[in-house]
């Protein structure tokens, strides 16, 4: 699969087949995630992969953005203790979030290549998710990613034309 096809094929999947994802494929997703850029090479992201069906179901209950009954939910977290020790205030405020987002994108693009579907989720009841995953206070939950085999073909959303989003040298008002 050409990389351009991988990018074009990444859509938010909200309906999954009830089929487990092999551990080897999940490890490939995380291996792709950790190749993402990271501020000051902190590598403060941590990935908790929920595969136990009862845990995934409970997480889904506290995550209205999930839906679709995914077989896997990946929590992308930042290790704030490590960032405090090795990073800066800027890293704590912005760097971790940016690092997590870039790692998530790598993970989601790798999923497309493997035939898997994903959806990045930020709408969840944080305290409930933290409690279910037994996250220590030193980890900040950045986002959840549902993962699984897509049920059906996703509808590709319309994208704005380039003349509305691309500018060179200076801002121009679009009509």
Image (cartoon, rainbow, N blue to C red):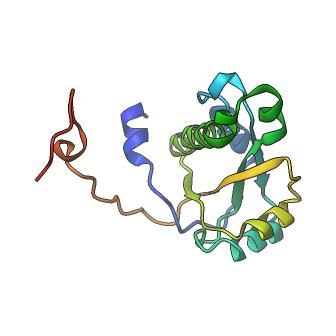
**175 over 33 or under it: above or below:** below
Image quadrant in which you'd find residue 55: bottom right
Question: Where residue 171 appears, x then y in whole percent?
Answer: 21, 37
Residue for point 53% across, 60% down = 150
Pick the residue in front: 143 or 175.
175
Question: Where residue 107 appears, x then y in whole percent?
Answer: 60, 41
Residue for point 70% across, 58% down = 73
Image quadrant in which you'd find residue 24: top right
Image mark count? 0
Q: Is residue 127 left or right of residue 111?
A: right
Pick the residue in front: 90 or 175.
90
Residue for point 43% across, 40% down = 6
Pick the residue in front: 52 or 89.
89
- Locate the N terminus by quadrant: top left
Residue for point 38% across, 39% down = 5
Q: Is residue 168 left or right of residue 88?
A: left
Residue 21 visible (yes or no): no
Of all residues, the one furthest to the front in this rendering is 89
Image quadrant in which you'd find residue 89: top right
Question: Where residue 140 appears, x then y in whole percent?
Answer: 75, 50
**22 over 64 or under it: above or below:** above
Of all residues, the one furthest to the top in this rendering is 40
Residue 15 visible (yes or no): yes
């Amino acid at each position: 699969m050409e990389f351009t096809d991988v990018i074009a094929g990444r859509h938010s999947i909200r309906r999954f087949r009830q089929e487990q994802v092999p551990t080897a494929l999940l490890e490939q997703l995380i291996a792709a995630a950790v190749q993402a850029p990271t501020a000051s090479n902190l590598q403060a992201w941590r990935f908790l992969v929920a595969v136990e069906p009862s845990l995934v179901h409970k997480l889904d209950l506290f995550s209205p953005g999930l839906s679709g009954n995914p077989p896997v939910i990946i929590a992308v977290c930042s290790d704030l203790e490590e960032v405090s020790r090795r990073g800066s205030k800027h890293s704590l405020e912005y760097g971790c979030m940016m690092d997590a987002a870039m790692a998530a994108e790598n993970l989601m693009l790798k999923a497309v290549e493997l035939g898997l579907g994903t959806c990045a989720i930020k709408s969840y009841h944080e305290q409930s998710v933290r409690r279910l995953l037994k996250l220590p206070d030193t980890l900040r939950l950045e986002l959840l990613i549902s993962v699984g085999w897509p049920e059906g073909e996703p509808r590709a959303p319309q994208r704005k034309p380039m003349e509305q989003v691309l500018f060179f040298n200076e801002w121009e008002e679009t009509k």
